[in-house]
Amino acid sequence: MDKRIRFYVSRKNPLTWLMALCMIASAVVRIIFACVRGTGDAGFIWGQTVLPVAACLLYALICLMNGQERYFKTAIPVFMMALYLCFYTKTVLAGFSSWLLFLYCFLYLTLATIYALTVDGRIRHFWVLLLVYMVPLAVRAADNWSQLEVRFVLHSVWELAPDGLFLLGLILGVFATWIQNDGKYHSTWGDRSDGRRLRTLYPMAQISPYIMVTRNSSDNHFADTVEISNVERYIRQKRREGMTNFGLTHVILAAYVRTVAKYPGLNRFLSGQKVYSRGGDVQVCMTIKKEMSSDSPDSVIKLHLKPTDTAQDVYRQFDKMVEEVKNAPLNSDFDNTARALSLIPGVFLKFVVWLLRALDYFGLLPRFLLEVSPFHGSMFITSMGSLGIAPIYHHLYDFGNLPVFCAFGCKRRANEVTAEGEVVQRKYLDMKFVLDERIVDGFYYATVIKYMNRIFQHPEILDEPPTEVNQDID
């Protein structure tokens, strides 16, 4: 796993609130300056007022709202402030050599880059920023005081107030910053809210998403047949233990999450031509009918499982969610979202879907939409056996990031002749998978399928959590 240091700020720390107060005060003073002096031309408004005000407020917002997990994003407002200083320097140095302006701008952008590398953990000592902060403060002070007499010192201090408050907030931020010591992975640049980007894949795995762009042009179809005599005995045992609704779906889901524990590459997904890992969050989507009739409305559930879950955990969570959907009116989050989209006229709906695709491509889709979307998850599973038919090859969705679709059909009996010449009857379950080949290679998928088959022959291992959970690569 990634060994970089992770920094954070906490809302429980008073220094964090003082830092945010300085940022807000800086924004307020800039707005007062704009009101007192007048607006000026559009370039002045955007470069000298809107840009730094937005940077100050954004910095405070990031620290207060998500400083625990995404403190590294404060680099964005710092770069905004660097651009503001470039605009300011261009105004102050009007008529001077363009090389001097270039050196100033290069200095500011370099300092912002050092800040970005520090908050991202690439520079291990956060106190280094104290030295960095002194540079723009000294330059700004020199610009203001170089041509002023002593009697205008107080006026100069007032002129420096907005930038001084911002720098004071940054300095307070140094003392409010702590190192993450919880041993968990924390997001950084390039990660999504629903997964972390894998950066050490071999070159072919990084190039293939640009060649095979859509899922339906990159999927492999696989059919398998599982002998389920042991599974049926296991199901009967669980029902005797009080799990009255325990069935094949629970066994398949429990076997899947157990496989993810050993082969974490199965829990990857592809979005924006990059491969991501969901880590310990196995998201299973399934369509549920309120009643088994052709005119009964459909709803979709999304089950969040962990690689450490046992068959009992899967049973408890799955049945709870199914009962909630069946016993509630048609007003789940998924249903409400679908209903809201259906009210949009067709032409505008096409634009909305395009916008959602674009946001999803760049990892900017809001978390609540990812949660209700049936197109985002680890696997979609469907039981054709409940419909009384054989399994189908169900296509993957080009919208979203689902990499696996699993369908299983009715149980069937087959008469077979043993080596001793006896005729025996065995039960089988047919399963069909559609797999996105860009997340792992064929050898990996083959290993996964063989491991799941071994679990089906010894389902009792699902009663205990795995002894070891493997982590995906960086």
Image (spheres, rainbow, N blue to C red):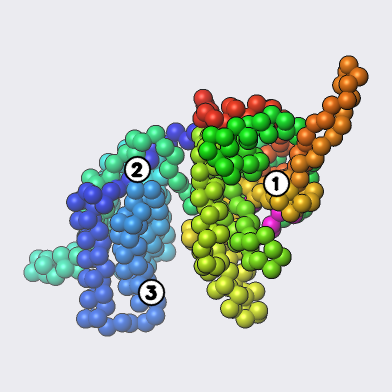
Distance, label 1 to label 2, CA atoms, is 40 Å
The answer to whether marks 1 and 2 mark residues whose Cβ atoms lie closer than 8 Å is: no
In the image, residue 234 above or below residue 25: above
Camera-nearest residue between 308 and 155: 308
SS category of the residue bearing label 1: strand
- Which residue is tagged 1? 406
User: What residue type is disc 3 on?
Assistant: Trp
Q: Position of residue 135 (x, y in %)?
A: 28, 51
Q: Residues within 10 Å of mark 3 (few under 14, many from 20)?
A: some
As drawn, is 306 to the left or to the right of 74? Answer: right
Residue at position x 60%, y 61% in the image: 290
How many numbered callouts? Answer: 3
Which residue in the structure is indicated by mark 3? 46
State the CA–CA distance, disc 3 to disc 2. Answer: 32 Å
Classify 10 Å Cα crowding around label 2: few (below 14), some (14-19), many (20 and above). many
Q: What distance separates the C-alpha of mark 1 from that of mark 3?
A: 53 Å
What's the magenta bit mostly, secondary-structure-wise?
loop
